Amino acid sequence: GTTTIIGDNMGATVSRIQAFSIAGKKATVRSMQQPFKVITVTLPEGVGADLPVNITVDGRTTISNIFSYYAPEIMNVKISNGSMIISGFNFGPVGTTVSITVNGSAYNSLTQENATITCYPSSSFLDIIGRLQVIVTVAGQTSPSFTYVPPPVPAPTPTPEPMPAPAPTLEPTPTLDPMPEPTPAPTPAPTP
């Protein structure tokens, strides 16, 4: 991002500024709004408060502790698969040391990006059914406390009793009439 720096003796033009850094990291001077007094710079990634600003104008360097990055701010906390995922702003570039406090206990076991931190607190915190107070500290700057409210646990759905199987219906078995015995053919009378 960019910021405006207000001061004195910063040169009549941008070309008079030979170097500008914040906490030893080079910042790029973009423009001068008012000669000697107001410049706009592109900030290097960073964290912290009261950082030294070095400006070299016409070969002379001035150092003052006037610059602070914004403090961290938590926007959301989600618990998933044994981890706590914290989303927000101003957590610093990857690799920045970040401390997480959950209900007063500090945790440093985490992975971190500028807007997301994944923390692995003990399972006892993740098993709590209730509110958690979460605080992020980056380079001595602390976020306001964020209250995590777990989602409501849905009431268990009662398991319906199984319906008894209906009694089998017996169909009458048709009876077959026995076939009549064939009538024997009359035997012819013996011939004399």
Image: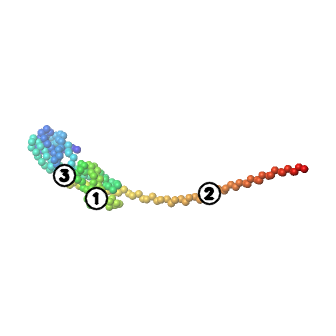
Q: Residues within 10 Å of mark 3 (few under 14, many from 20)?
A: some
What is the secondary structure assignment of the residue under circle 1?
strand
User: Do the CB atoms of the residues marked 1 and 3 lie less than 8 Å apart?
Assistant: no
Rendered image: mark on residue 49: 3
Q: Nearer the viewer, residue 174 or 81?
A: 174
Q: Residue lying farthest front?
A: 192
Mark toward the start of the polypeptide (2 vs 1): 1
Q: Residue at x 21, y 50 (%)?
A: 47
The vertical placement of 31 against 185, above or below, is above
Rendered image: mark on residue 114: none
Could you tell me if residue 135 is visible in this image? no
Residue type highlighted by circle 1: Val
Q: Residue 139 in the image: x percent, y percent? A: 21, 53
Residue type highlighted by circle 2: Thr
Q: Nearer the viewer, residue 192 or 187?
A: 192
Residue type highlighted by circle 3: Ala
Q: Residue 20 in the image: x percent, y percent? A: 15, 44
Q: Residue at x 13, y 46 (%)?
A: 54
Q: CA distance from mark 2 to mark 1?
A: 66 Å
Q: Residue lying farthest right?
A: 192
- Between marks 2 and 1 in the image, the one whose residue lies nearer the viewer: 2
Could you tell me if residue 98 is visible in this image? yes
| Residue assigned mark 2 | 169
The vertical placement of 14 against 94, above or below, is above
Q: CA distance from mark 2 to mark 3?
A: 86 Å
- Between marks 2 and 3 in the image, the one whose residue lies nearer the viewer: 2
| Residue assigned mark 1 | 102
- Using residue 179 as the reference point, say whether residue 42 is left or right of it: left
What is the secondary structure assignment of the residue under circle 3?
loop
Q: Residue 88 in the image: x percent, y percent? A: 28, 51
Q: Residue at x 35, y 55 (%)?
A: 81
Q: CA distance from mark 1 to mark 3?
A: 23 Å
